[in-house]
Amino acid sequence: MKESAKDSESNGAVVRPFPRAGATPADHVPPEVRDVVELLREACGRDLVAVVFFGSRLLGTSPGEESAADLVVVVENYLRFYESIGSRLPAARHSGIMAALNRALPPNIIYLNDPGGMRAGAKCFVVTEYDLTLALSVDAKDHFFRGRLAQRVHIVYARSDRDRLAFERRIEAARRLTVDWVPIYLRGESFGVLDFCRRMMEVSYAGEIRPEARSRVLEVFQAQASFFRLVYGRVLQDAAREGCLVAEGDRYRLAKNPSWRERRRWAAFFRRSKARATLRWFKYMLTFDDWLDYIVRKIERRSGVRIELTKSERRFPVILLWPKALRVIRAMRRVEANRAAAPAAASVDRGDA
């Protein structure tokens, strides 16, 4: 039975109605995501501020329903959250340690496996409202949240209308900040909306070590093309009105060429962001239950390469898995090269070349 907005308000929270029947698959919020939200609400009450749905499950990109749901879980206080949710985690851990790790390098990722019959579970990116606000601002320490929430997202839960509006404004402000750096990576060329967004995605993905093929960027970009045209069309128009960009028909260019200091500052920002993203992998070994099996499954889906782990590799993955990881990366690149070569070969066979 669907919960009405009125029922939600009576519980002190506002859950906006999910998209009605007839919405496209990418717009549909899976029922199991609602199950996760209910689990979090029951456990945390008013300490749960918002839940933001993002990632491949929302966008409908591969592997579809086999993909875990990605959720930004915004909370009031780290320690209270882990004390509330601890008994429901797949493996109970000391709440004080989890809270300390979250404060040191947000977010923590906790993996809720099979809540409410989910096929692939849910990855919950736990962060306080204060830390998320900083991470989306001009003073962000890295690109982690700005890169993810600049894309298409869905606020599936907010504690109140005021909280929802505040998060919508923060996400919109983060998207406007892309004008500060994306044109620098377009090498002084004029650009359209989709040129801008594709380069934004390429640089964002390059800012982290990911167990995915390079073609993944194009797949995720194409899945959001209509969103990018609408949202970033407005972002670039506003930037042109403010004098940051010069509009030339449906294309844009920077009003002022960036200085070498600006270029160096942004290069340093993304290097720091990549270093912090890499450090998080060590933390996920403690916070992400069954993290190694999850990564292995993800790589197998992306590469088509079967991975068998020895007992020693499972016990000391950081030390012993590097040779196997390098072989898998090479295999993924071969698969990607073969896919890219196939259309060209078909074109030659047809006599198009």
Image: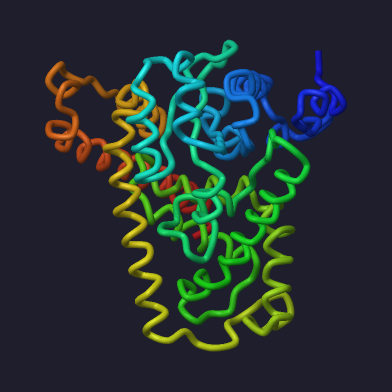
Q: Where is residue 138 drawn, in percent x and y?
A: 52, 66
Q: Where is residue 210 drawn, in percent x and y?
A: 36, 44
Residue shown at 77% from the left, 30% from the top: 18
> What's the coloring here?
rainbow
- Quadrant that contains the N terminus: top right
In this rendering, does residue 338 appear at all? no
Q: Quick one: 287 or 123, which is closer to the camera?
A: 287
- In the drawing, does residue 2 fall left or right of residue 47? right
Residue shown at 26% from the left, 36% from the top: 328
Q: Quick check: 170 above or below 42?
A: below
Q: Where is residue 87 drawn, in percent x and y?
A: 45, 13
In this rendering, does residue 229 appear at all? yes
Residue shown at 43% from the left, 33% from the top: 109
Q: How many marks?
A: 0
Q: Where is residue 253 drawn, in percent x and y?
A: 60, 81
Q: Quick one: 37 or 8, which is closer to the camera?
A: 8
- In the drawing, does residue 214 fall left or right of residue 9? left
- Quadrant location of residue 193? bottom right
Residue shown at 74% from the left, 49% from the top: 165
Q: Quick one: 234 or 78, which is closer to the camera?
A: 78
Q: Quick check: 335 above or below 349?
A: above
Q: In the orientation shown, which residue stands out farthest toward the right?
A: 6
